[in-house]
Image (spheres, helix red, strand yellow):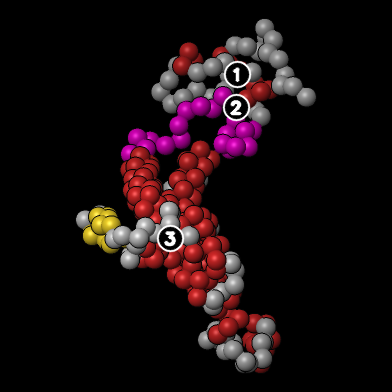
């Protein structure tokens, strides 16, 4: 069913959507009243409400957060490209010097270490992508707030750390979530690490459940009979 058409009687400025603060009627498109009442599920606002929800001070912080996340994304991507250029092919028979961020490496002797550096960079790239996606979604939907700035600053670094150590657990055989053979080459290691970094929140939640199963908790140690919270209160 199409949107209702505007008629001569309802195309005046009185039927238009709300005007931008401080603006005039000619500053925005004329939207029929019946159409203006239709909610846009993507942005959680009515059609025709195009004015920004945020003052300039908020946009300044949004811009800084955006630039910070993009800088991490570009830096880690550049590191991945540089490492992949040397690590992705089969190791050559002769040693080759590889300066990376001012640190001299010898290839192929340091190939394994460079591979794990790529895992960390890839995890940070995945975390940056997730944070950037959350940033533009929250700004568009009106759910952005300044109190989440710590989350947006920390998540790329946390994602890189989670990607490295979860990959080590998998490669060592302690976890069987992913086939360990993926970490024998650059493409598999970088791809898996990006997924772990992007879904680091889900990975940490799954690891918490696994830790409760393996080690138990302070209230319910491993091997003890589980008592529901309600039942525990009645016995105390």
**Vertical comparison of 184 with 234: above or below:** above
Residues at discs 3 and 1 in contact (Cβ within 8 Å) = no
Determine whether 15 is above or below 73 in the image. above
Mark carried by residue 119? 3
- Residue shown at the point (40%, 52%) measured from the top left: 84
Q: What range is drawn magenta here? A: 39-60
* Magenta span contains residue 25: no
Residues under labels 3 and 1: Cα distance?
A: 51 Å
Quickly name the residue at label 1. Answer: 31
Q: Which badge, 3 or 1, comes first in the chain's sequence?
A: 1
Left or right: 48, with 111 as reference point: right
Task: Residue 56: name its quadrant.
Answer: top left
Q: Which mark is first along the chain, 1 or 2?
A: 1
Provide residue 91's location: percent of width, then percent of height. Answer: 39, 59
Q: Nearer the viewer, mark 3 or mark 1?
A: 3
Tell me if residue 84 can be seen.
yes
**Quarter of the rendering occupied by the N terminus:** top right
What percent of the width, then of the height, locates residue 186? 46, 57
> In the rendered structure, are the residues bearing label 2 and label 1 in contact, judged by CB atoms less than 8 Å apart?
yes
Residue furthest out toward the left: 102
């Amino acid at each position: 069913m199409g949107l209702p058409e505007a008629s001569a009687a309802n195309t005046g400025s009185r039927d238009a959507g709300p005007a931008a603060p401080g603006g005039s009627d000619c500053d925005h498109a004329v939207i029929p009243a019946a159409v203006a009442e239709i909610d846009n599920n993507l942005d959680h606002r009515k059609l025709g409400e195009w004015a920004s929800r945020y003052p300039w001070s908020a946009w300044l912080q949004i811009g800084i957060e955006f630039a910070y996340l993009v800088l991490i994304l570009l830096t880690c991507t550049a590191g991945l490209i540089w490492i992949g250029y040397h690590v992705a092919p089969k190791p050559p028979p002769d040693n080759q010097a590889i300066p990376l961020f001012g640190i001299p490496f010898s290839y192929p002797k340091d190939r394994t270490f460079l591979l794990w550096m790529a895992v960390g960079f890839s995890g940070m790239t995945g975390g940056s992508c997730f944070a950037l996606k959350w940033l533009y979604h929250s700004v568009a939907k009106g759910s952005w707030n300044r109190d989440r700035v710590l989350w947006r600053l920390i998540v790329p670094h946390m994602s890189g750390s989670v990607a490295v150590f979860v990959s080590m657990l998998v490669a060592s055989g302690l976890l069987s979530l992913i086939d360990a053979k993926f970490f024998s080459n650059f493409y598999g290691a970088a791809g898996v690490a990006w997924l772990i970094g992007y879904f680091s929140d889900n990975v940490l939640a799954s690891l918490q459940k696994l830790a409760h199963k393996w080690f138990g908790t302070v209230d319910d140690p491993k091997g003890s009979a589980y008592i529901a919270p309600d039942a525990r209160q009645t016995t105390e």
